[in-house]
Image (cartoon, grey):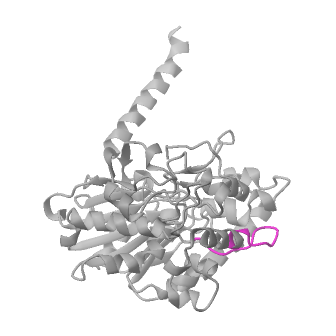
Amino acid sequence: MMMNRRPIHLFLYGLCSLVILLKVESFNVGITYVETAVAKGAVCLDGSAPAYHFDKGFGAGVNNWLVHIEGGGWCNNVTNCLQRINTRLGSSKQMVKQLAFSGMLSNKPQFNPDFYNWNKVKVRYCDGASFTGDIEAVDPATNLHFRGARVFNAVIEDLLAKGMKNAEYAVLSGCSAGGLTAILHCDNFRALVPSSTKVKCFADAGYFINGKDVSGVSHIEAFYNDVVNTHGSAKFLPAGCTSKMKPGLCFFPQNMAPTIQTPIFIINAAYDSWQIKNILAPGVADPHGTWHNCKLDITKCSSTQLQTMQGFRLEFLNALNGLGTSPSKGFFINGCYAHCQTEMQETWLRADSPILDGKTIAKAVGDWFYDRSPFQKIDCPYPCDKTCHNRIFDPQENPSPTTYGTRSNDFERIKNFNRNILTGK
């Protein structure tokens, strides 16, 4: 009997240890609704008030602010946006009241040495267009509100009233669609906070590229074009970009990055798992599912698929050239199969975290922010980096947008938006 029970005891011990570790590495923060925004029309897709989670700073960090934008994909037409209004990605009524903060949002110096005592805010994502839309008219048949740009401004206004007007340092950051928000709104954020505040931006897994899929078609370009048209986003994209090309193309960082004046740091995996799954090999371009196992686990990729992914990496690096070489622009591009690496303690800063040029993401970002040293590093091609935390997807999982980023098996699922919302990372 003891021989049979021992494996169960070991499993339970391991499970308990994991739970304790997660509790130590993260803490819960309550939700705040910006009710005053409703009168301004700054609302989620369903007309509900925007929301954020706010952990107050302390000690030397009391006048420093980190505003982090949640991820969650995009909706590109009325049908898809309607499918979001009964989820947390379209309504604050559906959002959890407590959210775990860890990684870059940790309040412990051993886990987040440069930002642990800052005021830390996680802005909930509920507009479906990386906070760029603003259409006044509301169709009574759908009651959809395309007001993301207003929401962004209303949230920042609320935070200024709560102390950010006295900020010495301020950072706008985000993950996935939130990372794209940080890129698109970086200069706008700079303009909204006091001129005396030192402002920089971080974008995690938000550098989405306009790449062709394995069938030779750029589905993401058509999708982004629909997003911009549906939400009326064009007027909130940089004029320096929209004056040269159609607005939908200015949703891509590679095209609008040259217009960014505010210092910005890009954190991205060269083999970003979301982009591999949805830009390079979406289901619509792979009708026979040849890429299915490869997208679930990069170690299952064939040599031909890996060669295709190496080509995607080179395309990504070429798109990164839009940032320029100024030390005011930093980047940490590791050779991993991952998506969003700043929100999770294991990839932000831990003994086994990813390393590039001898630095963790936390160290590289912190050194760059405080001007201790510049950082513009690109990792060697897969599989040379043994510090990677490469994502492995559960084949039984029904992936959909989460706080960790947008997970989906193919691009069609982005268009149709799976209703099975996952709240974990």
Does residue 219 lie above or below 321 as drawn? above
Give the residue drawn at x 71%, y 66%: 280
Does residue 21 lie above or below 186 as drawn? above
Residue 359 appearing in the image? no
Q: Nearer the viewer, residue 248 or 315?
A: 248
- Range of residues picked out in magenta: 208-221
Q: Is residue 359 left or right of residue 295?
A: left
In x, y percent, where is residue 175?
47, 62
In x, y percent, where is residue 292?
75, 51
User: Based on the displayed image, in which of its 4 quarters is residue 382 positioned?
Assistant: bottom right
Does residue 252 lie above or below 230 as drawn? below
Determine if the magenta segment contains residue 229: no
Main secondary structure of the magenta stretch: loop
Q: Is residue 235 left or right of residue 299?
A: left
Give the residue drawn at x 35%, y 63%: 155
Q: Nearer the viewer, residue 232 or 330?
A: 232
User: Based on the displayed image, in which of its 4 quarters is residue 312 positioned?
Assistant: bottom right
Q: Is residue 144 left or right of residue 97?
A: right
Determine if the magenta segment contains residue 220: yes
